[in-house]
Image (tube, helix red, strand yellow):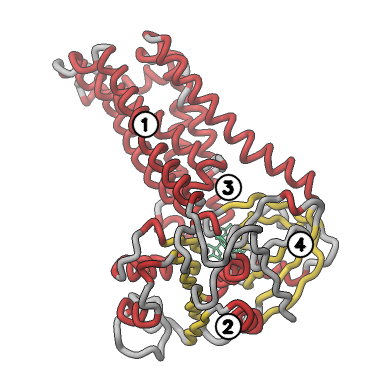
Amino acid sequence: MSAVLSWPRPAGRVPGRVDGQAARTDAVVRTGAVVLLWCALLLVSYWWAAGGGVQDLSGTAGGLTSAGRLTGLLASLLLLVQVLLMARLPVLERAYGQDRLARHHRIVGLVSFDLLLAHLVLITWGYADGALSRTPATLWELTVDYPGMLLAVAGTACLVMVVVTSVRAARRRLRYESWHLLHLYAYLGVGLALPHQLWTGQEFLDSRAATVFWWGLWAASAGAVLVWRLGLPVWRNARHRLRVAAVVPEDDGVVSVHLTGRRLDRLSASAGQFFTWRFLAGPGWTRGHPYSLSAAPDGRSLRITVKDLGDGSRALGAVRPGTRVLAEGPYGRLSARARSRPKVAFLAAGVGVTPLRALAEELPYAPGDAVLLYRFRDRPLFADELTALARQRGLQVLWLPGPRRAPDSWLGAGVGDADDRTLLTAWVPDLADRDVYVCGPEAWADEVRRTTSAAGVPADRVHVESFGW
Ligand SMILES: Cc1cc2nc3c(=O)[nH]c(=O)nc-3n(C[C@H](O)[C@H](O)[C@H](O)COP(=O)(O)OP(=O)(O)OC[C@H]3O[C@@H](n4cnc5c(N)ncnc54)[C@H](O)[C@@H]3O)c2cc1C
């Protein structure tokens, strides 16, 4: 397609000058979030200790029950933190980006799950007076006799299923959609597992402050999901009413979809961000797919560029102009917001060039201050558009054709024998003083991260979006 190149330069900004205020604000939010989490963990442990938790540790049965209470409390807190991490809270989305939130969600999830299992075993063992042989019968009694316990067992079963299907080996065998559908049972699991604590837990009933804390946290988590995961997307779609304007082939199996809608200037989307898209074009519309913007949004239209990798992406080639589109977003931190340095480097692989091409269009920079290293197998995408950006804006483009030269290298064949770090720092000698934006498959992006770290780029200046789950 013919390139229409325009780039909004925000009034009063000189290309190449970056104040980095947003990046600093986001760093403060990240520090605040970690401090808040530790304060909450300490507060919950304090309530446990104040309720005699430490003294109870002295006897066998009492000690097991007390340790079970503590692990249960910490597991509940982390379960709710997990929900908040994926609730699309704007303040967290901006500070972390979804890629990083998903990683944290995974780690917090595994820790809370281990604590949950420890809670189940320790409490039951404690109630069985420390006699292991009596624990199955005790578990049965607890389940049928205590309020909320039947729900808690059902909730735990949901969480076990979610964790088992999220283990990497199992995840690889599942289609994304199947895994995602199963993963939604985690909400049911959390919803069912927590009430037994609120109804019967000693720490909740003894202290008014603790009761307010736990009910408040539970309500805030549920409210965040309802507002930001459901309410906001519904409202945005009603407001913007997106439609397909055109579908343009870019290469074999790659199409660009142009979209229009109402008041797109109010969408507050930036180049580099992505939406989860649903095209109302027949069966399969319920399955959302994340695609990044491949052109800087101009307030009137949006563009995505999609490679055919399966049913959902293939179907886009046949979508007709006028088709209604539902979009959830914008998400992601691969945007101007993350920037803190005047100079930038973009590192792309394959169709991962889409958000970086949009960023190269939108970001302000002086000629020569932005470099794109673009690895592709046969033919590059957007060759004309990138050449025009090079000519008009001074974007430096280094084309890196060919298949990956080795599994532990992110570079293509034909670049010589030197290691990745040596080559990267030879091509971009001042890399350590740049913001580095990276996009491509997950394993490839991990290799890039390793190289940039070895080249002295601090982790908070490497901004990654990987096209994986
Ligand atoms: C943040 C993000 C931005 C992306 N941007 C682009 C883009 O601009 N252009 C582009 O061509 N591709 C992009 N992708 C990848 C794209 O979402 C998948 O290729 C697409 O969803 C595949 O769906 P399918 O039904 O065609 O294929 P399937 O057969 O379902 O899957 C093919 C491959 O895509 C993965 N996949 C499927 N659904 C998803 C999903 N919802 N989230 C993540 N991975 C999935 C599968 O694991 C598999 O590896 C992006 C992915 C992410 C996570």
Q: CA distance from mark 4 to mark 1?
A: 45 Å
Mark found first going from the N terminus, 3 or 4: 3
Residue 301 numbered tag: 4
Question: Circle 2 sits on which residue?
Answer: 380
Exactly how many numbered labels are in the figure? Answer: 4
Q: Viewer-nearest of labels 3 and 2?
A: 2
Q: Is residue 381 visible?
A: no
- Residue 428: image quadrant is bottom left
Residue type, numbered disc 1? Ala
Mark found first going from the N terminus, 4 or 1: 1
Question: Circle 3 sits on which residue?
Answer: 181
In the picture provided, is 260 more to the left or to the right than 159?
right
Q: CA distance from mark 1 to mark 3?
A: 23 Å
Q: Viewer-nearest of labels 4 and 2?
A: 4
Residue type, numbered disc 2? Pro
Mark found first going from the N terminus, 1 or 3: 1
In the picture provided, is 303 more to the left or to the right than 30?
right
Q: Viewer-nearest of labels 2 and 1?
A: 2
